[in-house]
Amino acid sequence: MTVKSILDTKGHDVVTFGPNEKLADAIKLLVEHRIGALVVTNGDRKIVGILSERDVVRVLAKDGAAALEQPVRAVMTPKVNICNESHTVNEIMEIMTRGRFRHLPVEKDGRLDGIISIGDVVKRRIEDVEREAEEIKAYIATA
């Protein structure tokens, strides 16, 4: 299974945010969409960072309520690990585990094309295991 197959099912929509917007507005967007991360892009969907719940908690613990007025660029993680459509689910699991994060933007031709979450990966792995189990049962039944 590849990232392409996941995106073909879930779609390519990604909630994005500008780097100069206030953190308070980004938090509202996270809550509104019930998501754990925003991909920070410039006007042409070029990825410039990612803002996760972990980033928000870290800055709030450090700066308190004053952090809410900071621009996202001051809080986001600027060095973003990305993947592309040809990455396999196993490769994605390895990248997420090694980096200790739960969201991985998908890039195509230098632009944001989607996002894969740990939930997407787990769901796909469960589907694969269930399908394999059914195939084994069918094989045994016909043997």
Image (spheres, rainbow, N blue to C red):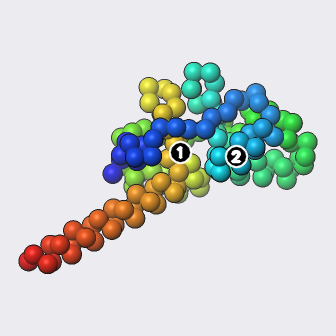
Q: Of label 2 and label 1, which has the lower sequence position?
A: 2
Residue 70, image x and y in percent? Answer: 84, 35
Is label 2 in a helix, a strand or a loop?
helix
- Tell me if 64 is positioned left or right of 4 in this view: right
Q: Nearer the viewer, mark 2 or mark 1?
A: 2
As shown in the figure, which amino acid type bears the numbered disc 2? Glu
Q: Which mark is residue 32?
A: 2
Residue located 71% across and 49% down the image: 31
Residue 122, image x and y in percent? Answer: 46, 60
As shown in the figure, which amino acid type bears the numbered disc 1? Leu
- Tell me if 96 is positioned left or right of 6 in this view: right
Q: State the residue lying farthest toward the front.
A: 32
Residue located 69% across and 29% down the image: 18
Q: Is residue 128 above or below residue 65?
A: below
Quarter occupied by the C terminus: bottom left
Neighbourhood count class around disc 2 (C-alpha, 10 Å): few under 14, some 14–19, many 20 upward = few
Q: Give whichever of 29, 21 is nearer the camera.
A: 29
Q: Which mark is residue 104?
A: 1
Q: State the residue lying farthest toward the top.
A: 44
Q: Is residue 42 above or below residue 31?
A: above
- Tell me if 63 is positioned left or right of 18 in this view: right
Q: Is residue 43 above or below residue 58?
A: above
Neighbourhood count class around disc 1 (C-alpha, 10 Å): few under 14, some 14–19, many 20 upward = many
- Tell me if 42 is positioned left or right of 63 in this view: left
Residue 37, image x and y in percent? Answer: 64, 46
Residue located 33% across and 51% down the image: 1
Q: How many marks?
A: 2
Quarter where residue 73 is shown: top right
